[in-house]
């Protein structure tokens, strides 16, 4: 093997959860992957070990200054029972760009993908096969040097953990209610919005809690400077079908997380002949399209739900009800295509699938 990651198997395997009832992200497999970085050895000592708590010095720099990044990806079981990954090289590349932004030494794409495969091979019995289910994979890197002071860490830990997850849509795909945020900000030009950095997420929690109390599911974030331009929905990208066109926020502002599901969805939509516009557009334009009866569909794209249809957008006192609060045909077709490719039920025309045995 190209990378000699060591494997230490658990002697006390856990009971697997009931996949039809398990809550997303609460049940973890028997093993985890760890690898360390220091300036002398570079990234070294990659290993699969039994899943266990990490012991950290209270001065671990990540705990204070959040110098850390993460990823989210999935492994799926195909109809023959074989396990496959969806575009893992894209997660590896995005990790590299997030790493650069956060002064974290990069990991080779091949090494990263091999680390994921090695862990999933050891825990492959944990990859569920029920419809809609998958193994969610959470790789992350954090600053592990111990000191108090703001400077880049010289030591890091790369860790991967996995959770078996059931169908995101228990009881069918239910369109979400979205609150368009006009006050708080997720990302600004020059900030870290285009990287999956740990510190991007906790600042949104306060508003999320408030909008949940108002009966909304997620926030649609607008640009940080003017709160005019449409950016993202929660931890997913936002896509609009306006007339026959597909609109989504351009990545050029540097404030949008370049979703792998977003990229895949746009490629599929283009292959179906849709005119896909990656551009800056305002929520006002969306409201005008709505009033003119041209806002046909809204949906979010992300690894967790793949495609999540939006049934209502609340902005500036206006309740925009999208497609009667029902799933649109484009969203449904796109979900069937992407989830079909991910689970080996639809031909992988784009070459996105990586088999665990490859
Ligand atoms: C992870 C994430 C996405 C979706 O990315 P995928 O690669 O499609 O899972 C979108 N927006 C934000 C802010 C995210 O953190």
Image (cartoon, helix red, strand yellow):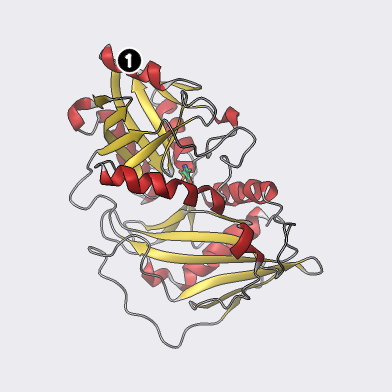
- Taking depth in this image into account, of 157 and 74 the one nearest to the observer is 157
Q: Residue at x 67, y 69 (%)?
A: 36
- Taking depth in this image into account, of 270 and 288 the one nearest to the observer is 288
Please, is residue 26 above or below residue 102 in the view?
below
Q: Answer with the quarter of the image where residue 271 lies.
A: top left
> For this view, does 177 lie left or right of residue 238?
left
Residue 117: x %, y % from top left: 53, 63
> For this view, does 9 lie left or right of residue 220?
right
Task: Let me know if residue 341 appears in the view.
Answer: no
> For this view, does 152 lie left or right of residue 89?
right
Residue beneath label 1, please? Answer: 289
Q: Which structural element holds mark 1?
A: helix
**Residue found at the far bottom of this picture:** 11
**Residue found at the far top of this picture:** 292
| Quarter that holds the N terminus | bottom right
Q: Residue at x 53, y 47 (%)?
A: 200
Please, is residue 314 above or below residue 304 in the view?
above
Task: Let me know if residue 297 appears in the view.
Answer: yes
**Residue found at the far right of this picture:** 40
Please, is residue 44 above or below residue 343 in the view?
below
- Taking depth in this image into account, of 243 and 122 the one nearest to the observer is 243
Q: Residue at x 50, y 21 (%)?
A: 280
Residue 28: x %, y % from top left: 40, 70
Residue 133: x %, y % from top left: 31, 57
Residue 174: x %, y % from top left: 22, 42
Q: Residues within 10 Å of mark 1 (few under 14, many from 20)?
A: some
């Amino acid at each position: 093997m190209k990378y000699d990651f060591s494997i230490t198997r658990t002697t006390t395997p856990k009971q697997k959860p009931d996949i039809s009832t398990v809550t997303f992200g609460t049940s973890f497999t028997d093993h985890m992957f760890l690898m360390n970085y220091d300036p002398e050895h570079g990234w070294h000592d990659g290993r699969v070990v039994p899943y266990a708590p990490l012991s950290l010095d209270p001065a671990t720099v990540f705990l204070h200054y959040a110098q850390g990044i993460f990823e989210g990806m999935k492994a799926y079981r195909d109809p023959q029972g074989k396990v496959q990954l969806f575009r893992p090289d894209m997660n590896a590349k995005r990790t590299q760009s997030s790493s650069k932004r956060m002064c974290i030494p990069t990991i080779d794409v091949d090494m990263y993908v091999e680390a994921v495969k090695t862990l999933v091979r050891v825990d492959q019995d944990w990859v569920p096969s029920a419809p809609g289910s998958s193994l969610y994979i959470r790789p992350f890197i954090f600053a592990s040097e111990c000191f108090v002071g703001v400077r880049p860490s010289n030591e890091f830990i790369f860790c991967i953990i996995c959770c078996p997850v059931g169908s995101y849509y228990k009881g069918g795909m239910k369109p979400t209610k979205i609150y368009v945020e006009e006050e708080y900000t997720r990302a600004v030009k020059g900030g870290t919005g285009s990287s999956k950095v740990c510190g991007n997420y906790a600042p949104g929690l306060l508003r999320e809690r408030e909008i949940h109390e108002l009966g909304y599911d997620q926030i649609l974030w607008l640009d940080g400077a003017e709160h005019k331009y449409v950016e993202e929905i929660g931890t997913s990208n936002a896509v609009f079908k306006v007339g026959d066109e597909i609109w989504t926020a351009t990545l050029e502002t540097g404030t949008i997380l370049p979703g792998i599901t977003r990229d895949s969805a746009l490629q599929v939509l283009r292959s179906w002949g849709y005119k896909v516009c990656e551009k800056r557009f305002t929520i006002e334009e969306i409201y005008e399209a709505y009033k003119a009866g041209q806002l046909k569909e809204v949906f979010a794209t992300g690894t967790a739900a793949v495609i999540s249809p939006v049934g209502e957008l609340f902005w500036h006192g206006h309740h925009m009800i999208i497609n009667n609060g029902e799933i649109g045909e484009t969203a449904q077709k796109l979900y069937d295509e992407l989830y079909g490719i991910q689970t080996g039920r639809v031909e992988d025309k784009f070459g996105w699938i990586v088999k665990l045995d490859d």
